[in-house]
Amino acid sequence: MNWTFIKAMLDCYKNIDKLADALDKRVTDIALKSAGFDGNFLPASYYVRAITDLTNQKIDLINIKVVIMDMINNLPYRYRIAAKYRYVENLKIKDIAQRLGISTRSIFRLLERTPLYCDEYLTKRGFDDEWFLENFANKKWMSKHLRNNAVKEKTIIRPQNNIYIIHAN
């Protein structure tokens, strides 16, 4: 799988819970509106499509979170610990190095090689670029991470008919 996608998946992990909470709040707001608390009663059937869309978005978030956690849990021990501290607990490199008792340079090396092991995991599970593009590339919450990592990896990502096209420079 393209390393830009792997890095975007790892980077987005820290925001997934916030996004899921925001979706829950929106569903609650819709429920309150359908109950007529705002003085404008509309039947719940009026909001079915909105609630279905929000529920599908939350399912997408849960799916990517499960894949990311399983991917991290299948890393070799030192990579797994470094990845959990960096991407799950969102610690700074300096803090990770201090906790593990190794140099910051070693942490950078571990995190730099992490996508290689993630790629092996994803390939074994049958997840490829097409799977990522089809399921996550067009999600608003993922696009920021894709753009940031595409710049770092010198990859051009162009949207075309709701599909992102990857061009390596």
Image (spheres, grey):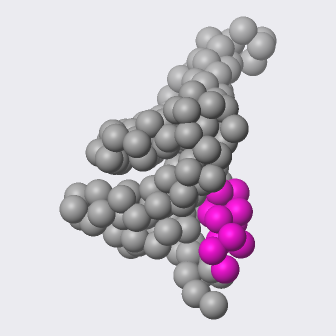
Which of 10/42 is in front?
Answer: 10
Q: Is residue 141 visible?
A: yes
- Residue at 45%, 56% in the rendered image: 114
Q: Quadrant of residue 13?
A: top right
Residue 102 lies in the magenta-colored region: no
Q: Position of residue 147 (x, y in %)?
A: 69, 66
Q: Position of residue 95 (x, y in %)?
A: 66, 32
Q: Position of residue 164 (x, y in %)?
A: 56, 75
Q: Is residue 138 positioned above or below 104 on the image? A: below
Q: Is residue 30 left or right of residue 117?
A: right
Which of 89/41 is in front?
Answer: 89
Can you name the residue that lies furthest to the bottom here? 169
Q: The C terminus is located in which quarter?
A: bottom right
Q: Is residue 102 left or right of residue 63?
A: right
Can you name the residue that lies furthest to the front here? 102
Which of 118/39 is in front?
Answer: 118
Q: Quadrant of residue 42?
A: top right
Which of 117/155 is in front?
Answer: 117
Can you name the residue that lies furthest to the top here? 37
Q: Position of residue 5 (x, y in %)?
A: 51, 64
Which residues are drawn in magenta? 142-154
- Residue at 50%, 68% in the rendered image: 3
- Residue at 71%, 72% in the rendered image: 151
Chief secondary structure of the magenta portion: helix
Q: Is residue 56 left or right of residue 7?
A: left
- Residue at 29%, 57% in the rendered image: 121
Residue 151 lies in the magenta-colored region: yes
Q: Is residue 17 visible?
A: no
